[in-house]
Image (cartoon, rainbow, N blue to C red):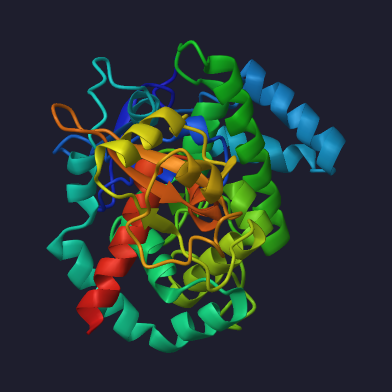
Amino acid sequence: MTDQQRSLRRPLLGAALTAAALGLCGVSPKLLAAGKRRVSSTREEEIEPGRYQNHPQARAFIDDMVARNNFPRAELESYFSQAVFSATVARLIMPPTTPGKKSWRAYRSRFIEPIRINAGVRFWQQNRETLRRAEAEFGVPASVIVGIIGVETIYGRDMGTFRVIDSLSTLAFDYPDTPNRAARTQLFRNQLADYLLWCRETKTDVFSVLGSYAGAVGIPQFMPTSLREYAVDYDGDRHVDLRNSPTDAIGSVGRFLQLHGWEANRPVAWRIASDAGSLGVAAAAADGEPWPTRTLNQLTRAGLRVDEPIDTQREGETGVLVVDLPTPDQPVEYMIGLRNFYVLTRYNRSFFYALAVYQLGEAVKAAMG
């Protein structure tokens, strides 16, 4: 092993890591991890240069990219001779050794809190016209876009500090030994392919893009597949820049939600009445599936009441799902989710995530006065 190939450490660039990036923005919902993880206080990334220069999996990936996408072999070989294995990334992607119990109240408290709400107010004030334009064009309320960006990166504060080429190479070729390793390896190889294609299409230096340890990019934490499919140049400068352009980030989130089926001028969720009958129906109907598989009529006929001023007759055939929100040592809370709640789970399948996005956006809107 040469000196270059020995394990090294390099300083991270200063921002906290976003584990909300593990939402992977429309990709593989089971990768979604709750909460945030931070690197050690030394803020160093442990790396191994040179690992992918002759790595057998990287060589096979190069062969495939040449055959499928007409990439010059020498160009790819140059990329992977410079990409590094990140032991930090490999460690952070691992699930916790002792998973805790899911707690809606603990999760909610991390996102619906004064620092994030105040930052959301400033973001809304600074980008008021762009948010208004996106709402008109995509049909997505400004509050929902603000909620997503706030949960993902606290409005651009925590976008991640790993080189995306390194994160994706590590996870594509050296995913840790876990029961789902094969599926995760393939997922990240697909992301790596889309990242290289996006860089080629946009003439972006592959070594210049920073992101989360999972390879998510920018203010809205888009994975490469979503970069290619949904990111938009919303500020008109002929360049998509999700890291430095709040305008591009706002337009891209709006477009993502619109293309996943957002229904303009429709609710996201309804509260369920707190009587025992309603809670019993909700408990029986909660199956963890994000897609609306029942109608409101089916639930109300079973005895559920909605604690909202709605026309239950007009809304009777509305497709809904039951959202369960457990907290240890507390009664489970329930909500009714509508089609737009389901659309939020396309960003991150977690019910906790989708409701936190919605409630943060509503809290920021209320604070705007």
x and y, in percent, of residue 254 in the image? 54, 68
Q: Nearer the viewer, residue 218 or 325?
A: 325
x and y, in percent, of residue 296 in the image? 52, 49
Q: Nearer the viewer, residue 228 or 52?
A: 228
> What residue appears at the point 54 percent right and 42 percent down from the top-left corner?
298
x and y, in percent, of residue 247 in the image? 48, 77
Quadrant of the image containing the C terminus? bottom left
Would you say residue 269 is visible in this rendering? yes
Residue 2 shown left or right of residue 61 in the figure: left
Residue 103 shown left or right of residue 356 in the figure: left
| Quadrant position of residue 73 | top right
Q: Is residue 144 above or below residue 59?
A: below
> What residue appears at the point 30 percent right and 60 percent down from the top-left corner?
359
Q: Nearer the viewer, residue 8 or 41?
A: 41
x and y, in percent, of residue 145 in the image? 43, 67
In the displayed orientation, state which residue is furthest to the bottom: 129
Would you say residue 22 is visible in this rendering? no
Total numbered circles: 0
Residue 102 shown left or right of residue 148 in the figure: left
Q: Nearer the viewer, residue 113 or 119?
A: 113
Quadrant of the image containing the N terminus? top left
> What residue appears at the point 55 percent right and 61 percent down from the top-left corner?
315
Q: Is residue 37 above or below residue 244?
A: above
